[in-house]
Amino acid sequence: MVNSVKCCVEVQQNQRCGSSIFSVGRVKPLLGRFSELEALLSNMNIKSGSIDAVLLDAGCSSMQMDQAERGFSLSKDGPLDMRMDGERYPDMPCAADVVNTLDQQALASILTAYGEERHARKIASAIVEARRVNPITRTQQLASVVAGAFPPAIVYARKDRLQRRAHIATKTFQALRIFVNDELNELHTGLCVAQSALKPGGRLCVITFHSLEDRLVKRFLQGHDLSNLDQYHFSQNQQGSRKKKLVDENSGCNKSPNWLPVKRKVVSPEKDDVRENPRGRSAKLRIALRQDRPVGEDLPVYQQEVREDGSPL
């Protein structure tokens, strides 16, 4: 892709292990979170309104999922970590801190909000009971605790989008990962920085992998004010959870729609793509153009996708 166009590509990542895959030349890898993107661009003397295109790829990478010591995978035993950037921020709370510290109500709230887990209270209760005996410090230990709260026939009763059996703890792991890494706030910050950095007519492409991310991106492109959305965020200095605004109420980011969709519907992988890369089965791509908004002129509102029966997605 890089060789097909004449451009300079700045690649941001939040893990060191990926740096080696980039070659020198027009590709410049920058280590940092989305919340650090504005400072990284400033250090590169990249001014607001000067970038032609931005691609945001949300969530964790396959490299992270495949490393048992990172603690993302419930199928591989490892320390219950889940921090994407734990090497740079060793004092950052990990998933083990969350499951062994927060009370039952806070745990249930996290599982509901970030895992969309309908059995959140039951799972939270099982976690609290288990940690009274021994701290939960390993991935498969947590998976066993969650599975133990259900009859054996239920553990693999759920199916993914490929109709493969999924472990009952899958949503619990997703919720903890999102919570530990503050992923939704990070994504929203990345969107705001992209809005500022892109030149008029610049293209924003965002790849998401679950409904929470996609919903946030869709509402951002529609111009919704996201400052009234609350999310739980773990504080190492507290024994419970506290609410943190998704964005600063005074930021003024995206108070009105400034985006023109390139495609009316979200782009999803084809069957052949999913067969080749099963992990991409839930990926969604949204593409929009950054617009200048002349005084007194409204832009076309981002189209809401609908199902065949007319109901909104």
Image: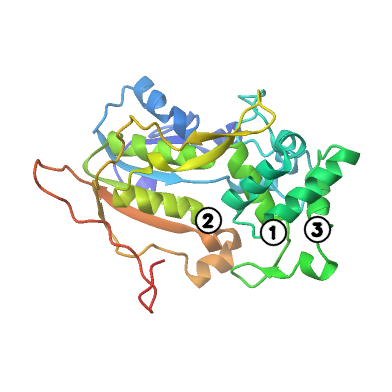
Binning the other alpha carbons within 10 Å of mark 1 as few (below 14), some (14 to 19) or many (20 upward) gives some
> Residue beneath label 3, please?
147
Whether residue 35 is visible to the viewer of this picture, yes or no, is yes
Could you say which is closer to the camera, residue 201 or residue 134? 134
User: Residue 167: percent from the left, percent from the top?
Assistant: 73, 61
Choose between 271 and 8: the one closer to the eye: 271
The first of marks 2 and 1 along the sequence is 1
Residue farthest toward the front in the current orientation of the protein: 105
Image-based side of 121 in relation to 29, left or right: right
Q: Which residue is mark 1?
A: 119
The numbered dot on residue 210 is: 2
Residue 274 against residue 91 in the figure, above or below: below
**Amino acid type of the residue that numbered disc 1 sits on in the rendered structure:** His
In the picture as drawn, the residue positioned furthest to the left comes out as 296
Q: Are marks 2 and 3 in contact (CB under 8 Å)?
A: no
Q: Amino acid at mark 2?
A: His
Q: Name the colour scheme.
A: rainbow
Identify the residue at horizontal 36%, vertical 70% (top origin): 306
Q: Position of residue 173 (x, y in %)?
A: 68, 49
Q: Quadrant of residue 26?
A: top left
